[in-house]
């Protein structure tokens, strides 16, 4: 994604105005969205197959289609704001986005700040090394090694928890490049993204381990009663898509398997 939305200064300039407008309104967040007629969604836009540009420059992917389905369920238009990962949750907190749909892991730490929808997909984190690397076979082997991971991601936290020195970068492609050229010993990422990358790009890599527990992907919203009705509608939409099979169909379309259960 060439036009990554830089939110740093925008957030600082916007927080005051957003806080004032929300503080003086008796309408909740859902009512304001419907009144505006648009749902503002934050996602990376360069994380295939969750959200990425196709050959014609259109933004597509599993998260993109889930976000569009939610907007349609709410009866509003959608505005997708591509943003680097390390700015997504910050942008959600400040009100730049109404929601973030970007394969966000549900963690205890994040639940202190955000309310989450029910999961709409499940995945595993995998440990990836060069195919000629025989020193790293488990996550425990990362102690004293170097990993490359997306800035602020749970994958970065996993690497650090096992004693690795973590190099923060923006994209999966960058992490794998650092591994390939020997500037990082390993990277940790979503199994789905790695499989997709290898099927499209290929490379001298192998998976040596994966987490036992599945990662639940859900949609975060700011905590509080202001989002109670919006969260309920998002959950209703997800439940409807699970019930009619459309969510599973999207999963198969982008991941070649049903990751919704």
Image: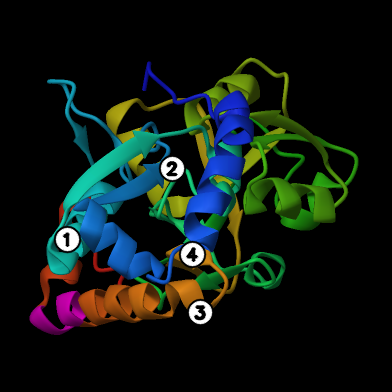
Nearest the viewer among 246 and 219 is: 219
Q: In this rendering, would 70 be left or right of 27?
A: left
Query: Counting other residues with Cα less than 10 Å from the Cα at mark 2, is it few (<14), some (14-19), or many (20 or more)?
Result: many
What is the spatial separation of the Cα atoms under label 4 and label 2, in whole angstroms? 27 Å
Q: Nearer the viewer, mark 1 or mark 2?
A: 1
Which residue is at a point 72% across and 67% down the rendered structure image?
109
Q: Earlier in the sequence, mark 1 or mark 2?
A: 1
**Looking at the image, is 218 positioned above or below residue 100?**
below
Q: What percent of the width, then of the height, locates residue 102?
A: 42, 51
What is the spatial separation of the Cα atoms under label 1 and label 2, in whole angstroms? 26 Å
Nearest the viewer among 39 and 19 is: 19
What is the spatial separation of the Cα atoms under label 3 and label 2, in whole angstroms? 38 Å
Which type of secondary structure does the marked residue at label 1 adopt? helix
Q: Is residue 241 magenta?
A: yes
Instruction: Please report the bounds of the magenta region as a residue range.
Output: 240-244
Which type of secondary structure does the marked residue at label 4 adopt? strand
Residue at the spot of label 4: 221
Q: Which mark is residue 69?
A: 1
Nearest the viewer among 82 and 96 is: 96
Residue at the spot of label 2: 194
Nearest the viewer among 156 and 184 is: 156
Query: Counting other residues with Cα less than 10 Å from the Cα at mark 1, is it few (<14), some (14-19), or many (20 or more)?
Result: some
**Looking at the image, is 213 positioned above or below residue 161?**
below
Quadrant of the image occupied by residue 211:
bottom right
Residue at the spot of label 3: 225
């Amino acid at each position: 994604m060439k036009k990554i939305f830089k939110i740093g200064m925008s957030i600082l300039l916007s927080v005051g105005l957003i806080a004032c407008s929300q503080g003086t309104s008796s309408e909740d967040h859902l009512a304001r969205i419907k009144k505006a007629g648009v749902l503002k969604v934050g996602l990376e836009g360069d994380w295939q197959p969750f959200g990425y540009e196709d050959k014609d420059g259109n933004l597509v992917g599993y998260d993109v289609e889930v976000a569009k389905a939610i907007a349609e369920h709410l009866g509003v238009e959608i505005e997708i704001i591509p943003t680097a990962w390390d700015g997504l949750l910050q942008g959600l907190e400040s009100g730049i986005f109404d929601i973030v749909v970007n394969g966000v892991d549900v963690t205890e730490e994040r639940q202190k700040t955000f309310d989450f929808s029910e999961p709409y997909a499940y995945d595993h984190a995998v440990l990836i090394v060069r195919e000629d690397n025989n020193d790293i076979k488990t996550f425990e082997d990362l102690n004293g090694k170097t990993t490359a991971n997306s800035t602020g991601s749970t994958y970065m936290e996993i690497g650090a928890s096992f004693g690795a020195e973590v190099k923060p970068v923006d994209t999966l492609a960058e992490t794998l490049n650092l591994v390939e050229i020997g500037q990082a010993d390993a990277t940790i990422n979503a199994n789905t993204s790695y499989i997709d990358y290898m099927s499209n790009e290929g490379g001298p890599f192998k998976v040596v381990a994966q987490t036992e527990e599945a990662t639940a992907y859900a949609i975060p919203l700011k905590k509080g009663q202001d989002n109670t009705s919006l969260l309920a509608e998002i959950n209703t939409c997800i439940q409807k898509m699970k019930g009619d099979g459309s969510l599973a169909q999207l999963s198969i379309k982008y991941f070649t398997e049903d990751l919704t259960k």
